[in-house]
Image (tube, rainbow, N blue to C red):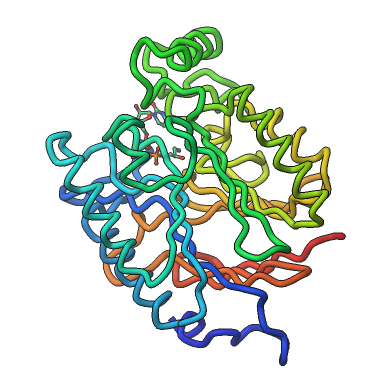
Amino acid sequence: NQIMSQPNALLPQGKQPLFSFGVITDVQYADIPDGHSFLGVPRYYRNSLLVLQRAVKKWNNHQNISFSLNLGDIVDGKCPKDQSLNLVSKVIQEFKNFNGPVYHLIGNHCLYNLPRTKLLPLLSIPSVHPHAYYEFSPIPEYRFVILDGYDISAIGWPHDHPHTIQALNFLNEKNPNENKDSPNGLVNLEKRFVKFNGGVGKEQLKWLEKTLQEATKSNQKVIVCCHIPLDPGSTSKDSLLWNYDEVMDVIHEYDCVKVCLCGHDHKGGYSVDSHGVHHRVLEAALECPLGVDAFGYIDVFEDRLSLIGADGMASCEMVFNH
Ligand SMILES: Nc1ccn([C@@H]2O[C@H](COP(=O)(O)O)[C@@H](O)[C@H]2O)c(=O)n1
Ligand SMILES: O=P(O)(O)OC[C@H](O)CO
């Protein structure tokens, strides 16, 4: 891809980014033949590892990528479970070939393979286990807030954990189907009440509020990341966070959040919400046919983020409104 091999090719002359970071999502690797999604979209389970390998090579060759960000789902739920530990470790090893820190988010497919207790240490998630939300600040002017979209979830917690029970009760109340992964009969935004999504719990919401207050005091701009999309305009309705509205209400109380980056909805999407926050759902590596890529890097400026995508990942200019 021309653009990926020419750093700053799209930038106004003389404008250097404050920093740049690599992005990839939904690798969903499995050592199984190609298949398709429930709705028939082709999925290339083995090829996705090659996409990740090419991403790491591009980020390393670029030489100015400060860190990389994986927005979740590194191994597919169809991976035979006796291979889960090996394959999760194999994909993590591919990420470790990147010459810099890698920040991981967890997704539903990660949790189909391994429980949180095993998964989080393997991903070196810098949170207080078993939580998977955390924050980091690569430069004083910017803070990244990583949300755990499977905090309240019927996937990944022990079967008798309060969060599993809360999630199952919620799904029973909201989704009448026997198969709780099916949005059949649900109308419009109700379609999000399926088991492959999840929600952000009360403690995490409080933490988000506190973190955004601190960022505001420190005059920092914030990029919020979550495997599950946060704005209906950016995604299919069946791939939205259960309580996206509660999370967005907190985010909208503050002016510091400029961009939300997500995965999960493999076709990708983009919207700007009513408060001017940009929502970019990144395209999945899993759905790249042989030789095609879907990854990118983001140049960060004082007033905007510029996503430079390869092949199936659309480039995107996200200019802040204030
Ligand atoms: N419209 C849909 C979509 C999904 N399901 C169920 O979810 C499972 C996962 O879907 P994928 O597209 O990610 O494979 C699928 O196996 C179905 O059980 C559904 O019922 N209706
Ligand atoms: O990656 P999956 O298989 O959980 O699919 C999530 C999609 O957004 C469902 O439409």
Whether residue 292 is situated above or below residue 236 in the rendered picture: below
Whether residue 205 is situated above or below residue 24 in the rendered picture: above
Q: Quadrant of residue 78?
A: top left
Which residue is nearer to you in this view: 205 or 311?
205
Q: Is residue 270 left or right of residue 126?
A: right
Residue at image x 71%, y 28%? Answer: 246
The spot of residue 213 in percent (x, y) is 78, 41
The spot of residue 184 in percent (x, y) is 47, 21
Residue at image x 54%, y 8%? Answer: 173
Q: Quadrant of residue 319?
A: bottom right
Residue at image x 78%, y 68%? Answer: 303
Residue at image x 59%, y 68%? Answer: 307
The spot of residue 194 in percent (x, y) is 48, 24
Image quarter (top left, top right, bottom left or bottom right) of the C terminus: bottom right
Image quarter (top left, top right, bottom left or bottom right) of the N terminus: bottom left
Q: Quadrant of residue 94?
A: bottom left
* Farthest left residue in view: 82
Whether residue 292 is situated above or below residue 179 in the rendered picture: below
